[in-house]
């Protein structure tokens, strides 16, 4: 597969490194036909490998791969939790369906208008066992 095709595919699936120009790691400079600085998953993996296998300090490994030290720890935690799949970015948007049920929506519709989203959230949790954030309640009221 050509580098151009690979870059197009990475762009299509949203796996491009946001700042490939910041990558200074030698592998990405010396072996550009295999190590592609715009491949975010490969860059994350090599960042972890450079620290764990090569013994590079966290700050240096992160910097050489275009990430912050804080991002390094997030990548490491995701990898420890889910392996290679953890190196993929989380999908954007809602993580799951809204937890409203017909009963909780009925309660919300009948709730006193002066009650805050936090108060209603607590009452829904108590009555129906559903934990909803106050902002979810407030958005549903509009």
Image (tube, rainbow, N blue to C red):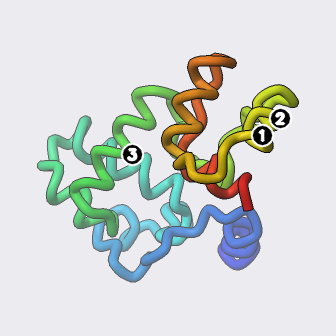
Q: Nearer the viewer, mark 2 or mark 3?
A: 2
Residue 110's disc number: 1
At a point 38% along the width and 50% down the height, the residue shown is 46
Query: Residue 96 falls in which quadrant of the image?
Result: top right
Where residue 22 appears, x then y in whole percent? 33, 78
Q: Nearer the viewer, residue 25 or 15?
A: 15
- C-alpha span from label 2 to label 3: 42 Å
Q: Is residue 113 left or right of residue 23?
A: right
In space, the residues marked 1 and 3 are separated at their CA atoms by 45 Å
The C terminus appears in which quarter of the rendering? bottom right
Observer able to see residue 139: yes
SS at mark 3?
helix
* Quadrant of the image occupied by residue 104: top right
Q: At 55% across and 63% down in the image, what residue appears?
A: 39
**Tag of residue 75:** 3
Image-based side of 134 in relation to 107, left or right: left
Q: Nearer the viewer, mark 1 or mark 3?
A: 1
Q: Residue at x 79, y 44 (%)?
A: 109
């Amino acid at each position: 597969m050509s580098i151009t095709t690979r870059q197009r595919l990475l762009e299509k699936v949203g796996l491009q490194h946001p700042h490939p120009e910041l990558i200074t790691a030698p592998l990405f400079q010396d072996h550009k036909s295999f190590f592609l600085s715009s491949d975010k998953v490969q860059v994350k993996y090599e960042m972890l490998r450079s620290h764990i296998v090569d013994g590079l300090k966290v700050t240096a490994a992160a910097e050489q791969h275009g990430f912050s030290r804080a991002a390094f720890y997030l990548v490491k935690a995701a990898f420890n939790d889910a392996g290679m799949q953890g190196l993929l970015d989380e999908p954007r948007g809602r993580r799951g369906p809204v937890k409203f049920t017909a009963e909780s929506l009925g309660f919300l519709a009948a709730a006193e208008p002066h009650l805050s989203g936090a108060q209603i959230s607590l009452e829904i949790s108590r009555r129906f066992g559903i934990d909803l954030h106050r902002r979810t309640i407030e958005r549903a009221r509009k």
